[in-house]
Amino acid sequence: MATPSRSAKRVLGKGAHIVTLTLSPALDIATQVPRLCPDAKLRCSAPSYAAGGGGINVARAIHLLGGNALALFPAGGSSGRHLIELLDAEGVPNRPLAIANGTRECFNVVEQASGRQYRLVMPGALLSPVEQEQLLASLEALPALDYLVISGSLPAGLAADFLPRVLQGARRRGARCLIDSSAAALRQALAVGGVLMIKPNLSELSALVGEEISEPQQLARIAQGLVRDGQCETVLVSLGAAGALLASDGLSERIAAPSVPRRSTVGAGDSLVAGITLKLAAGAGWREAARFGVAAGSAAIMSEGSALCRRSDTERLYAWLQAYGGS
Ligand SMILES: Nc1ncnc2c1ncn2[C@@H]1O[C@H](COP(=O)(O)OP(=O)(O)OP(=O)(O)O)[C@@H](O)[C@H]1O
Ligand SMILES: [Mg+2]
């Protein structure tokens, strides 16, 4: 059954109730090797551990930005316990669902000779049909839900109606849903309708619409088309160093990312989604929320390793974007 952690109550009592759902959480392990080569034993530096997976990172980034979000996720085995301990130590409210399979471990290896990063991503732990029902029940049982952020990949074997049921349940309660996942998951979500925002990057959007996207006008037309068809209120396409395209109800706007020192791209997309959600939950409109999101995404780029956006960097970049950022 769902077991609320010590900090779970803190978020439910104040402000807008933001919940993130992560179906493939991960224990992220970061290390370095002098040089990657086959066959030889590769002596790594002492590893560092971080709680990972899309929605978990969004909740961590919201916490770093001074907000509150409850992370809901399945967790199993010693890696699952470790992940929960890490979230508790950071003060991120969390509600794990105990499952039989062990939480996956993912590796981020930096080769010191080249500075290259290798990200080894394991498949998410399988969820039994009973565990899937328990996860749905623990969502239903939340006393309050204003914003639901579904982020990260879906594990194999998830029931075809799982995501639609999550979205229908959230919609019945009047919650606003934001989704950052694979093209297949986005397609399912759009078929249900009533989604507040999807956040594909360019390749996810291409896969979603089955069209190579190479022209800015083509990108704007496709994003606007999804909004016009009523499949979701807003499409926010993240464009890496080029920033983002915001398409919402007659509005189509490129937000240029500020130029920042590039240390690590880990968590940029999750920080972007965290920034947008937090601003929307505070009552801001789309233009303001998207700028704050881009600022948070770019702030994540400035942080080393798997660190997410720092609040001070985000606020500074946001002020810059408010003054000069636009298409
Ligand atoms: N090189 C960069 N310089 C400045 N900002 C950047 C850079 N790369 C990414 N960003 C910021 O991060 C945001 C999200 O980046 P991106 O489009 O790469 O997301 P993503 O593909 O979802 O990434 P992820 O690998 O985290 O899933 C961008 O909208 C931008 O604000
Ligand atoms: Mg992404």
Image (tube, helix red, strand yellow):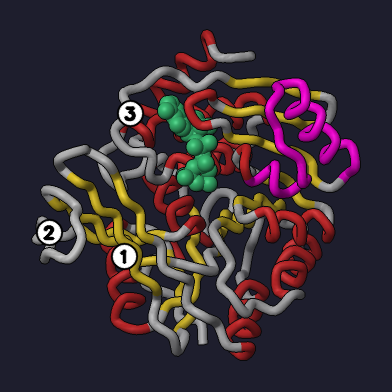
Displayed quadrant of residue 10: bottom left
Q: Residue at x 72, y 56 (%)?
A: 175
Q: Nearer the viewer, residue 200 or 76?
A: 200
Kind of residue indicated by mark 3: Arg
**Who comes first in sequence, dot 1 or dot 3?**
1
**Who comes first in sequence, dot 2 or dot 3?**
2
Mark 2 packing: few (<14 Cα in 10 Å), some, or many (20+)?
A: some
Displayed quadrant of residue 209: top right
The image shows residue 264, relative to residue 110, as above or below, that is above
Q: Residue at x 79, y 66 (%)?
A: 168
Q: Nearer the viewer, mark 2 or mark 3?
A: 2
The image shows residue 208, relative to residue 292, as above or below, that is below
The residue to which callout 2 is attached is: 44
- Determine if residue 108 is in view: yes
Decide if residue 155 is on the left or right side of residue 285: left
Q: Is mark 3 within 8 Å of ligand 1?
A: yes
**Who comes first in sequence, dot 1 or dot 2?**
2
Q: What is the magenta range?
A: 204-230
Kind of residue indicated by mark 1: Asp
Displayed quadrant of residue 44: bottom left
